[in-house]
Image: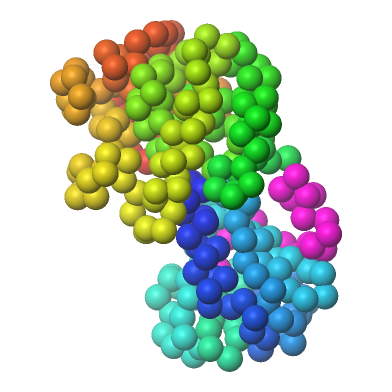
């Protein structure tokens, strides 16, 4: 699943292309929206909230989408050849005089009253990429269940919005915290939140994500997706294990030397499978 910085960048591209222009064509290809028509409405702006996208148009309506694992938005000059996937994967086309914004494989697509956006995103915690990020509220929510493993707590979007598996693993490594440590035992959970926010901010304007400062392929991350390879700091073997109960379980990566503390009770640490965001 894309992390918050990826969704932020999608929102920025859509906003740059569409904001201020009038929709000349709207084609919703999901049954619930088969008769929806937004032609003639001006796009007021596009924003991200955590991993959600909110495209607002005049008249008080918002097109809400979520990419989850496979969704994507592509921009093409109006009438140009599409490259985002086969036609049967298109869920929506929103066109202006200059651009076609095409949503592919979107698992969540709906039209809401803008005044009722909280119906879709009100459950989210503070967004780490929000300029007005409420750090105190994020920490209050994160600490609400002190016995919960911090790796799981960071992925819970109702605590704070935007962290995915990459920034969970990398932030915890950089702060020397085991993903399996209960939140209540972490000396400075605020440092983890601050680190995650800095990483998201540093990467939000780029299509690729690097937490090491080295964007070269294979050099981007400290522990993420590096099970069995040597730690870049201490040389110990990076390990991984599944964390959390299905269907919310995710693979996590860590260095047992640089991140001392509890580990998984079961299953034993094992090489990571592909993916795991």
> Which residue: 73% across, 40% down?
123
Q: Can residue 130 be seen in this view?
A: yes
Q: Can you give x and y, in whole percent of width and height, for residue 92 in the image? A: 61, 72
- What residue lies at 41% left-to-right and 18% top-to-bottom? 177
The quadrant where residue 22 appears? bottom right
Above or below: residue 265 compared with residue 243: above
* Scheme by which the image is coloured: rainbow
- What's the magenta region? 102-122
- Tell me residue 107's x, y (percent): 60, 56
Regarding residue 266, the answer to whether it shows in the image is: no
Q: Does the magenta stretch include residue 28?
A: no
Magenta span contains residue 108: yes
Q: Is residue 47 shown left or right of residue 74? A: right
* Relative vertical location of residue 179 with respect to residue 262 in this rendering, above or below: below
In front here: 232 or 51?
Answer: 232
Q: Quadrant of the C terminus?
A: top left
Which residue is pictured at 54% across the width and 81% down the height?
Answer: 100
- Tell me if 149 is positioned left or right of 49 in this view: left
Quadrant assignment, res 20: bottom right
Q: How many labels does the image show?
A: 0
Residue 228 point in image, percent of width and height: 21, 25
């Amino acid at each position: 699943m894309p992390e918050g910085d990826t969704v932020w960048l999608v929102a920025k591209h859509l906003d740059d292309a569409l904001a201020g222009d009038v929709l000349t064509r709207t084609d919703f290809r999901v049954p619930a929206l088969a008769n929806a028509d937004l032609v003639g409405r001006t796009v007021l702006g596009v924003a991200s909230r955590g991993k959600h996208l909110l495209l607002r148009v005049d008249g008080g309506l918002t097109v809400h989408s979520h990419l989850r694992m496979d969704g994507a938005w592509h921009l093409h000059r109006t009438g140009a050849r599409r490259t985002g996937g086969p036609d049967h994967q298109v869920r929506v086309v929103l066109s202006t005089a200059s651009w076609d914004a095409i949503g592919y494989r979107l698992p969540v697509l709906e039209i809401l009253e803008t005044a009722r956006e909280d119906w879709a995103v009100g459950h989210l915690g503070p967004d780490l990429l929000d300029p007005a990020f409420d750090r105190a509220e994020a920490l209050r929510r994160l600490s609400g269940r002190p016995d919960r493993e911090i790796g799981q707590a960071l992925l819970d979007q109702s605590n704070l919005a935007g962290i995915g598996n990459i920034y969970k693993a990398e932030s915890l490594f950089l702060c020397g915290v085991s993903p399996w440590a209960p939140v209540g035992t972490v000396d400075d959970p605020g440092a983890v939140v601050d680190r995650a926010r800095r990483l998201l901010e540093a990467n939000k304007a780029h299509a690729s994500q690097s937490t090491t400062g080295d964007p070269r392929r294979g050099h981007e991350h400290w522990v993420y997706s590096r099970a069995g390879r040597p730690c870049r700091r201490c040389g110990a073997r990076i390990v991984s294990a599944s964390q959390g109960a299905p269907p919310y379980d995710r693979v996590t990566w860590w260095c047992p030397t640089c991140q001392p503390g509890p580990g998984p009770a079961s299953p034993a640490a094992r090489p990571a499978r592909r993916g795991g965001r």
